[in-house]
Image (tube, rainbow, N blue to C red):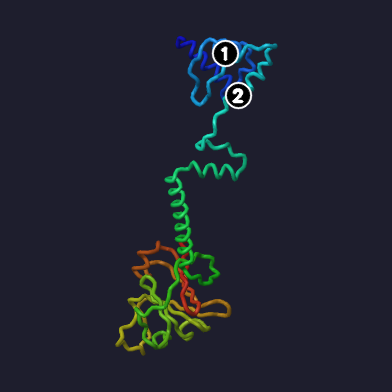
Amino acid sequence: MDASTQHELNMLQARAYGPEADIDQDPRAAQRLRELESTFAGPEPAGIAPVVPEPAPAEPAPPLGGHLGSHREAIREPEDERHEPEPDSVEARTSFIGKIVSPRLRVWWVLSVIASIVASAAITHALTSIAPVSSSSGAPQIATLEKTTAVEVPSGWFGAGPSSAVFEFFGLTIFESSGGYAVAGRECISAVATEDLPEPDANLNNQSIQGSYFAGCRVGAFPASVELFVDSSAPEEMRAQFPPGSALQFVFDGNRVGVFLDEG
């Protein structure tokens, strides 16, 4: 058999016995296939059993469709554990995909899930690490100040007491004070530049200060707060941290100070 005839036989067999067989609709092609199969015993396509020549019928030949149908049954591929049936349901497709995904891809998928969880936890921690302090200004809270012992405010200076809470924020010292040095109320706070605090041996009878002084007290449901602009009178550390003209609000809730920023 020459190469062209062999190719023709292979093509006709694929149309007759392949997964997309359509030779039933082409009588001439079916007749040609029978002629070649009865004349040559050529090599079969991979995975297809040899075609057994059809014996001469004693009676009129059955319809072509029936002939091809019986051949399809005869050449059905043997079961192989490497071939999986086509899944018919979502669960079956999921199981099938899980079998063919390589172990490396599974490892990458697990690592991506872990990375997502870690990133979500980090974001959640960042959002909850600032203890909220109530304010009606609507400005975002950027920090929560806890009490510090690194800065000392002398008792009796601008209403500071021996147990007054002290807080520090970029060169500004905020401390509890009595209401006599601010507006009427209770749970008051005062704020001055840290560099303007008196020396330990200073004469506290002279209640004076070189820089700016801010004070506020709780009035009814409104907590004690002080506000200031970041301008030339603000501490140098604060001017380096925040843009000129922005405003800061310090709200005292009795234990901590919430810091709110309005960038204008």
The disc placed on residue 72 is 2
**Dot label at residue 33:** 1
Left/right placement of residue 124 relative to residue 152 reads right
Q: Position of residue 149 (x, y in %)?
A: 36, 80
Q: Observer-nearest residue: 68 or 172? A: 68
Specify whether residue 146 is in view.
Answer: yes
- Reply above or below: 188 against 110: below
Front residue (pair 92, 107): 92
Where 100 falls versus 48 (above or below)? below
Give the mark count: 2
Image point (62%, 39%), residue name: 88
Q: Residue 47 versus residue 200: which sits nearer the camera? A: 47
How many neighbours does mark 1 have within 10 angstroms: few (below 14), some (14-19), or many (20 or more)? many
Q: What residue type is labelled 1?
A: Leu
Residue 153 at x, y percent in the picture? 37, 83
Residue drawn at point x = 57 percent, y = 22 percent:
17
